[in-house]
Image (cartoon, helix red, strand yellow):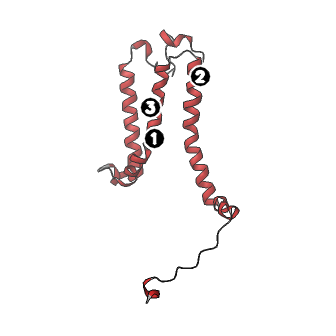
Amino acid sequence: MSETLNPPAPPAAPRKTWRQALTLYARPASVRMLLLGFSAGLPLLLVLGTLSFRLREAGIDRSTIGYLSWVGLAYGFKWAWAPLVDRLPLPLLTRALGRRRSWLLLSQAAIATCESSSQARRRPSQRVRKGSGKRSTSGAQAHLKP
């Protein structure tokens, strides 16, 4: 009767060595995902680290450089917004473009709107000249070398 209440435990699987366990990471699919993850995080590190250093060398104050850390918030909260982008259809755009393309169009439109409103709020001496792609050299911009 005790055998029916406590069935025998299944035999233990043979333990893998470290080398056998690490061979999982040598598979082509694992290597691809490793490279994709590395390439997704590396640009953020390079941009924030190197650009912050160079801006400080150019004499830009630390509070202005601190605003660059806001760029990292999009990556920091990716766990929250990525599932929405993957699953939530946009009412009119999804039918016409598909789910991912509609989100890309919406995000690009939001970025363009923010950039144009930022440009409109600047003083005329700080605006980007049309056609040149360069800012005027008045004020704080005068000491920066190309």
In the picture, measured across the screen, residue 111 lies left or right of residue 140, that is left
Tell me the amino acid under the disc marked 1. Answer: Gly
Up-down: is 141 above or below 49?
Answer: above
Q: Which residue is mark 2?
A: 54
Up-down: is 78 above or below 20?
Answer: above
- In the image, what residue occupies the spot 47% across and 21% down? 64
Q: Earlier in the sequence, mark 3 or mark 1?
A: 3
The CA distance from mark 3 to mark 1 is 10 Å
Up-down: is 6 above or below 36?
Answer: below
In the picture, measured across the screen, residue 108 lies left or right of residue 51, that is left
In the picture, measured across the screen, residue 145 lies left or right of residue 76, that is right
The CA distance from mark 1 to mark 2 is 24 Å
Q: Earlier in the sequence, mark 1 or mark 2?
A: 2
Q: Earlier in the sequence, mark 2 or mark 3?
A: 2
Tell me whether the residue at label 1 lies in contact with that at label 2, contact meaning CB atoms closer than 8 angstroms.
no
Q: Quadrant of residue 27?
A: bottom right
Tell me the amino acid under the disc marked 3. Answer: Trp
- Seen from this angle, which residue lies furthest left? 91
The location of residue 38, given as percent across then percent down, is: 59, 46
Query: Considering depth in this image, is 119 or 81 the residue closer to the camera?
Result: 81
The location of residue 39, given as percent across then percent down, is: 59, 44
Query: Considering depth in this image, is 123 or 4 the residue closer to the camera?
Result: 4
Q: Which residue is mark 1?
A: 76
- Seen from this angle, which residue lies furthest right? 19
Q: Which residue is mark 3?
A: 70
